[in-house]
Image (cartoon, helix red, strand yellow):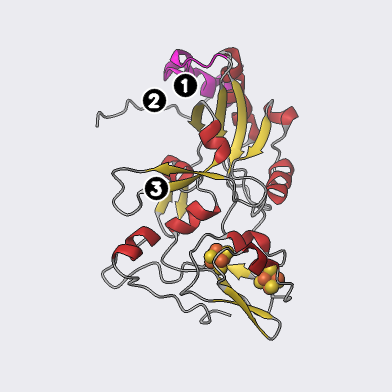
Amino acid sequence: MEKSKVYFTDFRTGLGVSLTVKLQKLIRMAGIGTIDMDNKFVAIKMHFGELGNLAYLRPNYAKAVADVIKENGGLPFLTDCNTLYPGSRKHALEHMDCANINGFNTVTTGCQIIIADGLRGTDDIIVPVPNGEYCKEAYIGRAVMDADIFISLTHFKGHEAAGFGGAIKNIGMGCGSRAGKMQQHQSGHPHVITDKCKGCRRCSKECGSDAISYEGKKAWIDPAKCKGCGRCIGACAFDAIRNDNWDARKKDGRVYCRCHQRKTELPYQSDNRRIT
Ligand code: SF4
Ligand code: SF4
């Protein structure tokens, strides 16, 4: 593959030239104007931050990019997919509230927010990955795939598992629906935190694999039946189902996804009673 040309700038500014103006200059230099955006949907993939943290790009930067897209005739929207973990972005309502509280709205950014994988993280499109070593198909949030043009507006960060998080993680993990994220964390299945489980049985209604049963009033996930779609995580209003990916590293140090597990006869069998 041909190496990409990388354009970058520093944080120094002169009188009357803000960082957002510098960002616009940078993306114009990088050739955003050469993309035919006329009346096309342009997805700006972001991370809106979790509630209470400041580790995300300020909305001003999103507006700077959205304004350039509009100048070029495009129809920008901000997007991200729901999280696998219970935080402040696990379904679309929470996610949009979180984005709003962190400052992302139509006034500050000049465009709408669409949560790409829908209300419960289940609205996805299966995208073939013909040369994928572990996975031959990816589950991507529908709004990302429905867009004509995709721009990754990424913040750089340290990451406890990957070392660093940047554009590749913003796209590769961030555009995955709940099923897509489950696939990437597939070395573990979700488990029930019994103390939090209220026995409402909503999760079993969501599960298409008949993997959830009840012992007393507490849900239990049978790892032998669980397909790892993650629907139950979004279904639980009490944050009682989690995927902690605790067995992500196999003995030989490699991480295996579900597709690979199928090939190798489930090298890892989660015991979801282990964490309660
Ligand atoms: S949806 Fe949550 S609280 Fe309800 S039974 Fe399932 S795990 Fe328990
Ligand atoms: S992850 Fe999917 S298959 Fe597994 S228990 Fe939850 S809903 Fe069922």
- Residue type of the residue flagged with mark 3: Glu
Q: Could you tell me which secondary element the residue under label 2 belongs to?
A: loop
User: Marks 3 and 1: in contact by CB < 8 Å?
Assistant: no
Labels 2 and 3: the sequence-earlier one: 2
Q: Residues within 10 Å of mark 1 (few under 14, many from 20)?
A: some
Residue 34 lies within the magenta run: yes
Residue at 35% over, 52% down: 135
Q: Could you tell me which secondary element the residue under label 1 belongs to?
A: helix
Residue at 73% over, 30% down: 106
Q: Is residue 189 visible?
A: yes
The Cα–Cα distance between marks 2 and 3, rounded to whole angstroms, is 32 Å
The Cα–Cα distance between marks 1 and 2, rounded to whole angstroms, is 7 Å
Labels 1 and 2: the sequence-earlier one: 2
Q: Foreground mark, 1 or 3?
A: 3
Name the residue carrying label 3: 137
Q: Is residue 15 visible?
A: no
Name the residue carrying label 2: 7
- Residue type of the residue flagged with mark 2: Tyr
Residue at 49% over, 63% down: 228
Name the residue carrying label 1: 26
Residue 208 position in % (x across, y down): 57, 63
Ligand 2 picture quarter? bottom right
In which quadrant will I find the N terminus?
A: top left
Q: Is 214 rendered above or below residue 233?
A: below
User: Marks 2 and 1: in contact by CB < 8 Å?
Assistant: yes
In the picture, residue 73 is in which quadrant? Answer: top right
Residue 218 lies within the magenta run: no
